[in-house]
Image: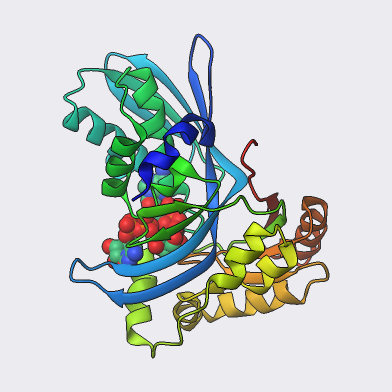
Amino acid sequence: MRAVQFISQAAGRLRLQWGDYPMRLSAYAKINLVLAVGGLRPDGYHEVETVLQQLELHDRLELRQAEQFTLYTDSAEVPHGPGNLVWEAAALLRERFRCPFGADIRLYKSIPVAAGLGGGSADAAATLVGLNELWNLNLDLETLLGLAAELGSDVPFFLVGPTALARGRGEILAPLPPAPEMGVVLVTPAFGVRAAEAYAHFDRLPGGAPPDLTPVLRALAEKDRYAVAQGLFNGLEAAVFDLYPEVRALKKELGKEEGVLGALVSGSGPTVFGLTADVEQAEVVAARLRSRGLPARATKTRGPSS
Ligand SMILES: C[C@@](CO)(OP(=O)(O)O)[C@H](O)COP(=O)(O)OP(=O)(O)OC[C@H]1O[C@@H](n2ccc(N)nc2=O)[C@H](O)[C@@H]1O
Ligand SMILES: Nc1ncnc2c1ncn2[C@@H]1O[C@H](COP(=O)(O)OP(=O)(O)O)[C@@H](O)[C@H]1O
């Protein structure tokens, strides 16, 4: 892993601001522009090669020093204690570094849960960064990346963003040039899909040809949003469609919309995203879809300094 390359970028990746009290962080969602899935490994994970891109859509966290450790969240869809990735990240730090400290953490969810948008992973990464500051642990990025990988395959990416290539089970990162700014329409059905379920079903289906990542990597380097949209690929998509045919229908609907340059299921789904030239176009498309009763929202890609 080229973790060292990321050290100087660390703090800027998660928007981190704290005055006297409390510390506030934003935890940004992701989409997978490309997700190539390889073989099942002896440890139960699949080899992947994926281009991850952060979005402006984000959860918010507030942290402050306290005697005990407590977690409040405004979402009824995530655990309010153990099992919440915020709780798990804090527990890992406390146990590994024998931290005697407590904290009150408030988590305000905006990223849909179990939607393929990496919300839990983003929250976990933000918690690692926030508590590292709050508790003065002085852990370097390489250490944080290792802890992040223990919490989940996608968590390390959220320490670096906004655009990266991930390999292995998702934890081996290489930076990529930030994507050109694009509008993103998200259509998220009311049900969730677990990553384990999508990968397990992938194993039951016949394998396809592995995609060539070169066009998307070139498109990112050239900041060519049309070529990025042309290169979209998700190896889990067929499994998600097979399990949930309504997701295939949603992708068709979104792909037909004027102004949508390309559409794809994000990660293990069920969110389908559509790329547009800018956020204004994404808002127009999302409003049109909402007027037809579809659960759509607009956001945009996150850039290096946003
Ligand atoms: C599919 C992806 C695409 O970015 O994300 P989501 O769309 O779910 O957010 C990731 O691979 C999900 O990453 P993450 O959600 O962190 O997964 P983990 O908690 O590490 O693993 C959950 C389960 O998914 C399966 N898994 C995960 C990653 C991987 N490379 N191979 C796998 O087979 C395993 O069954 C594992 O037990
Ligand atoms: N802070 C959190 N936010 C979202 N989901 C969480 C969180 N903590 C634990 N989870 C659990 O993690 C699972 C995956 O959620 P999420 O990260 O939103 O989805 P995905 O892996 O599809 O991107 C869900 O079952 C959810 O209950």
Position of the C terminus by quadrant: top right
**Going 28% across and 43% down the picture, which residue do you hit?**
146
Question: Considering only vertical position in the picture, is 265 above or below 105?
Answer: below
Q: How many labels does the image show?
A: 0
Where residue 200 appears, as percent x and y from the top left, is 32, 75
Where residue 194 appears, as percent x and y from the top left, is 38, 64
Is any atom of residue 246 visible in this view? yes
In the image, 92 versus 227, the foreground residue is 227
In the image, 77 versus 201, the foreground residue is 201
Q: Image check: 243 left or right of 132?
A: right
Question: Considering only vertical position in the picture, is 172 above or below 80?
Answer: below
Question: Considering only vertical position in the picture, is 303 above or below 269?
Answer: above
Where residue 178 appears, as percent x and y from the top left, is 61, 50
Q: Image check: 230 left or right of 49?
A: right
Quadrant of residue 169 within the rendered picture: bottom left
Is any atom of residue 76 visible in this view? no
**Going 41% across and 17% down the picture, which residue do you hit?**
64
In the image, 49 versus 90, the foreground residue is 49
In the image, 190 versus 63, the foreground residue is 63
Quadrant of residue 6 within the rendered picture: top left
Where residue 154 appears, as percent x and y from the top left, is 39, 53
Q: Image check: 132 left or right of 301?
A: left
